[in-house]
Structures are given as C-alpha cells and as structure tokens.
C-alpha cells in the first residue's frame, strides 16, 4: 500500500538502502545507519557533510534516534505478522519482510527492502505472483511443446518404418525378377546344349553309316569297287573318250582320294 511504501522509505538508510541498523540523526535532521555514516566520513580531512543534503556538519556527533529504531522494530513485527496471517509468500530471513517480489537475475524471491538494496537494485524485479504465473504458463507451454515433439518423433518413426518396408518390398520384387531371368537363361542354355548334342548325334550317325557303306564296298572285287566309287557322269565321259567306262589309272587316285 501507499502508506507501507512511505513507512519503508522512512525506515530505509539512504546509503545502504536497507532497514536502519542503529539509526543516528545528524544536525540537519537526516538519519543514517551508524556504520554507514561512519564509513562515509572515514579518512576525510575536510569538514563532514550530510550525504543526503550536503549540509556541512559542524560536529561529528552522532545522536542515536531511538524513536526511529522503535518504529522500525514495530514495522518489522507488523510486516511479519501480516505475512504469516495471510499465509503469504514467506518472510525474508534478513529483513523479516514478506517475500512479495522475484529477482529474475538471481531467480529468487525477495522482499521490498531487498529490492532497494545494492544487491538487487540494478536487477529486474517483478511481483512474485506474476513470476509464478509466467512460470506456470511457461511450464504448460513446455509440456505442450514436449507433446508436440513426441508426436513429431512418432510421425518420423512411422515414416521411416514405411519407407524401409517399401524398400524391402522393392528389393524382394527385384530378387524375384532376377531369379526368373536366371532360370529362363538356364533353360535356354540347356535347350541349346540339347540341340547341339542332337545335331552332333545325327552327324555321328551319318558318318557311321557312310563308314559302314565304304567298308561294305571295300569288300567287293576291285573292278566293282572302282565302278561304285566313280561317279556316273565321269563313267560316261570315259566311255566317250576311250570307248570304255574304265577309269584311267591317273584319275583313279583322284576319285577314291588316294595316291596311285
């Protein structure tokens, strides 16, 4: 609330920006922590001045402000009771204030005094309820993304299985075609071999008959043998030339294929 913020400002040291510790009052009326103002003046040879209004302080007398210390203690107790009574966001262990803020840099809940301190005043701070809501939304979005990723993975898995199944079917079909072609080629080779064997057998049979025929002729008398081996056309020629169908000796070797 507005009154709470005013009280917080009045109870905060302008130097350390935290609740007063042993508050003291200068001649100008401004309040500081005893340790803070002492450290501020330490080592200075010039006249002391108020860090807030720069008014020169004639005497370095630090007058304790007991009323402010009492008010500060009461404010701490009220803040603690309020946090506990409302079942709030917890209490700051250092300042006994409700943890109503969230530091995004440190990723931790802080109180309003922590927010004004040196440790956090340069950080990004948001109300703790807002941070919690963002976390819930982010977590929900993350779960949704996870489900989407799982669906994509499942789709890719099914796609891969389908493609490999198609590839297997294609290879099996190619295997069947190639085996069929090989079988056809084998049958063709066997057919050609059989044809060649048949032709060779016929040729052998013909030659065997010819040999048998020649052997039979060789058993005949010489005149009959020669007459059987000389072609009828040449017999006619010999008869016209020499008046005889007998083969001249010089042509006999040619007819029978031997040297005489």
Image (cartoon, grey):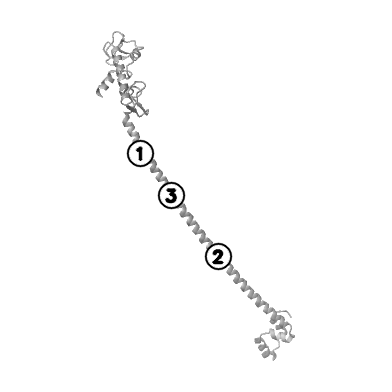
Residue at 55 percent of width and 64 percent of height:
183
Rendering coords of residue 4 (x, y %)? 27, 22
Residue 65 seen anywhere in this rendered image of the structure = no
Q: Which residue is mark 3?
A: 158
Q: Quadrant of the N terminus?
A: top left
From what the image shows, is residue 219 above or below residue 5?
below
Inter-mark Cα distance, 1 to 3: 26 Å
Q: Which residue is mark 2?
A: 185
Which tag, 2 or 3, sits closer to the chain's start?
3
Q: Which residue is mark 1?
A: 141
Task: Kindly check if marks 1 and 3 are in contact, taking CB atoms under 8 A apart as contact.
Answer: no
Residue 180 appears left or right of 257: left
Q: Nearer the viewer, mark 2 or mark 3?
A: 3
In front: 222, or 234?
Answer: 222
Density class for disc 2 (Cα within 10 Å; few <14, some 14-19, many ≥20) is few
From what the image shows, is residue 153 above or below residue 180?
above
């Amino acid at each position: 609330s507005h009154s709470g913020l005013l009280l917080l400002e009045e109870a905060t040291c302008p130097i350390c920006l935290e609740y007063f510790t042993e508050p003291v009052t200068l001649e100008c009326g401004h309040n500081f922590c005893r340790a803070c103002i002492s450290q501020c003046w330490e080592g200075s040879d010039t006249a002391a001045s108020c860090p807030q209004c720069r008014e020169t302080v004639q005497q370095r007398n630090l007058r304790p402000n007991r009323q402010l210390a009492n008010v500060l203690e009461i404010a701490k107790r009220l803040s603690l009771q309020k946090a506990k009574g409302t079942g709030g966001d917890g209490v700051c262990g250092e300042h006994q204030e409700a943890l109503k803020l969230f530091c995004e840099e440190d990723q931790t809940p802080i109180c309003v005094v922590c927010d004004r301190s040196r440790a956090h005043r340069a950080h990004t701070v948001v109300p703790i309820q807002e941070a919690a809501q963002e976390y819930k939304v982010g977590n929900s979005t993350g779960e949704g993304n996870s489900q989407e990723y799982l669906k994509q993975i499942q789709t890719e898995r099914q796609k891969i299985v389908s493609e490999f199944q198609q590839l297997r079917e294609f290879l099996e079909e190619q295997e069947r075609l190639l085996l069929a072609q090989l079988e056809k080629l084998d049958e063709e080779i066997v057919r050609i071999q059989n044809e060649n064997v048949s032709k060779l057998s016929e040729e052998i049979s013909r030659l065997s008959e010819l040999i048998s025929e020649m052997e039979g002729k060789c058993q005949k008398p010489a005149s009959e043998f020669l007459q059987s081996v000389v072609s009828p056309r040449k017999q006619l020629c010999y008869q016209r030339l020499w008046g005889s169908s007998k083969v001249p000796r010089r042509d006999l070797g040619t007819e029978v294929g031997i040297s005489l």
